[in-house]
Image (cartoon, rainbow, N blue to C red):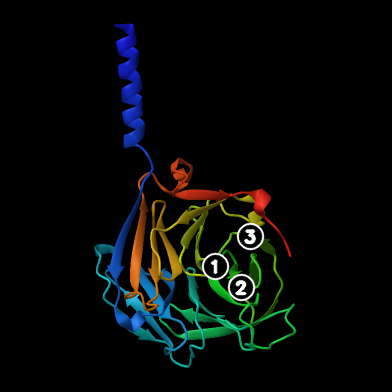
Amino acid sequence: MRRTHNLLTISFLFLANMLNAQEINYDRFVLNDLIRETSGLCIINDILITHNDSGDGANLYAFKNYQSGDYSITIESISKAQNIDWEDLASDEEYIYIADTGNNYGARKNLSILKVSREFKIVDVIQINYRRQNNFERKYKNEFDCEALVSFGDNLLMFSKNKSYDLCHIYMVPKHTSKSSLLPIDSISIGSLVTGGDYDPKTGLLALSGYDNSLRTQYLYLVKNFKLPIGENDVYRIKLPYQNVQFESVIILSDDEVIMTSENEGGGPPFALKISFSNGIQSLNELNENDVSIIRRSSRETK
């Protein structure tokens, strides 16, 4: 009887662990083709906001009912602004920050971050440049492209889309300045191109979107209890079950949900992807190794 009892106990514990196992759920929502180049996300007054990158006017697109699964849009135009190559959004209690920092060929000399009020009026423009750049000839493989912007206290953090070598540089831009000359404050090797970001000060969670050079493999990166230097953190890399798409943005909704958006790159319409973690993001270590890999401190470099 004792052996039977032990077997029943083991079976019960196994079943309990299976029932409590961390799972990732994906919900896909097709977006209006007006935002086929969706490239940034933020939340203002409980409204989810995105934008197109180059090729559009100075417009923000609002999903006012996204929480119910309704991704219809309204358009908010920003007067006296220009969209040269907007790549990401960040926000705090006062402002929206728009990263006009797209620089695919490393030739731009007019990079900036727009500071916009919550009433969608332009307040200021922060002019930026890379202190280490002295060659502005068109070159696809360059380290001076940036597509991820997050609000981090009194500063903005930019994460580079480095196509020159496998290293993402992190730059810090003070919010209360009109000009900033940038040097990396930290770097991390994560094995893909970083395309969007978000930071939640309440949970300390950092999220980044990215993909490899071929676009075949798409990633979500999560850093719990984020701090600088990032080398003190473990970076969780989640391989997404999508190919021939292009995830360009990510927003943290809660401790167990994020939303990402993908552009229309000829493989289908633009779409939003809500990703839910059954046991919360803080329990990422419970995921199967086929779902997540950990980039640890030994993988860090500086250059």
Q: Nearer the viewer, residue 226 or 213?
A: 213
Residue at the farthest bottom position: 80
Tag 1 near tag 3, CB within 8 Å: no
Rendered image: mark on residue 189: 3
* Amino acid, disc 2: Lys
Tag 2 near tag 1, CB within 8 Å: no
In terms of image quadrants, where is residue 188?
bottom right
| Residue 10, position as x, y percentages in the image | 35, 21
Tag count in the figure?
3
Residue at 61% over, 73% down: 163
Which element type, helix, strand or loop, lies under badge 2?
A: loop
* Amino acid, disc 1: Val
The residues bearing labels 1 and 3 have C-alpha atoms spaced at a distance of: 11 Å
Rendered image: mark on residue 244: none
Identify residue for label 2.
163
Identify residue for label 1.
194
Q: Nearer the viewer, residue 115 or 60?
A: 60
**N-terminal label among 2 and 1:** 2
Residue at 73% over, 85% down: 135
* Amino acid, disc 3: Ser
The residues bearing labels 2 and 1 have C-alpha atoms spaced at a distance of: 10 Å
The residues bearing labels 2 and 3 have C-alpha atoms spaced at a distance of: 12 Å
Q: Is residue 35 above or below residue 257?
A: below
